[in-house]
Amino acid sequence: MKIQFWSIGKTHEPYVKEGIELFTKRTGNYFSAEWHIIASPKNAGSLPPAELKKTEGELVLAALKKEDYLILLDERGKQLNSEGLAAFIQSRANDSVKLLVFLIGGAYGVSEVVQKRANFTWSLSPLVFPHQLVRLILAEQVYRACTILKNEKYHHQ
């Protein structure tokens, strides 16, 4: 199984870039893992939020394949603890999912069409975090889940 982290917006900011790269590389010891940053449309600042979400949603849907398993990150989603995330990832691997996609939406979230396409909606927390920090937390939590699956000590350091 391959894991891809998708985020709508700008490239990684320097203050989180090193951590994101570190945890993504570590995850690569368990599953192939990589980031895809989906750039917001050039005229994003002049679009009403609903139109921006629609346009960003079209970019996401165009990049997804029918068989890709889409996990949407949203504060209204289901919360999982670290062990629960590990079990969730293992279950997808057991189901022979080829590509597991974690999606961080744009500044206004994602369109209803993307919400409906998501196979699972996951909440890191009921708190709202800056997108850059969500990237770092996501990368670390997926790495942590991988270490839990292999019964490695990272989770309890």
Image: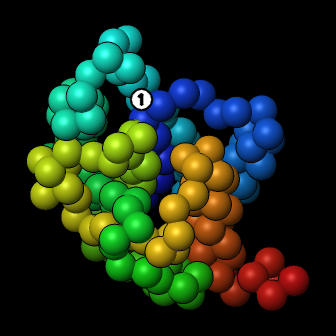
Total numbered circles: 1
The residue at 32%/17% (across/down) is: 46
Q: Secondary structure at mark 1?
A: strand
What percent of the width, then of the height, locates residue 38? Answer: 41, 29
The amino acid on which the numbered mark 1 sits, given as a three-letter code, is: Ile
The residue at 55%/42% (across/down) is: 34
Work out whether residue 82 or residue 129 is closer to the camera in this orientation and state it: 129
What percent of the width, then of the height, locates residue 131? Answer: 55, 47
Name the residue that disc number 1 marks: 38
Quadrant assignment, res 151: bottom right
Q: In the figure, 93 relative to 135: above or below?
A: below
Work out whether residue 38 or residue 132 is closer to the camera in this orientation and state it: 132
Quarter in which the C terminus is drawn: bottom right
**Neighbourhood count class around disc 1 (C-alpha, 10 Å): few under 14, some 14–19, many 20 upward:** some
The residue at 34%/58% (across/down) is: 72
Quarter in which the N terminus is drawn: bottom left
Q: Residue furthest right?
A: 157
What percent of the width, then of the height, locates residue 111? Answer: 20, 45
Quadrant assignment, res 53: top left
Tell me how the rendering is colored. rainbow
The reply to whether residue 29 is in sight is no
Work out whether residue 95 or residue 10 is closer to the camera in this orientation and state it: 10
What percent of the width, then of the height, locates residue 42? Answer: 37, 12
The residue at 20%/56% (across/down) is: 115
Q: In the figure, 62 relative to 151: above or below?
A: above
Q: In the figure, 105 relative to 144: above or below?
A: above
The reply to whether residue 97 is in sight is yes
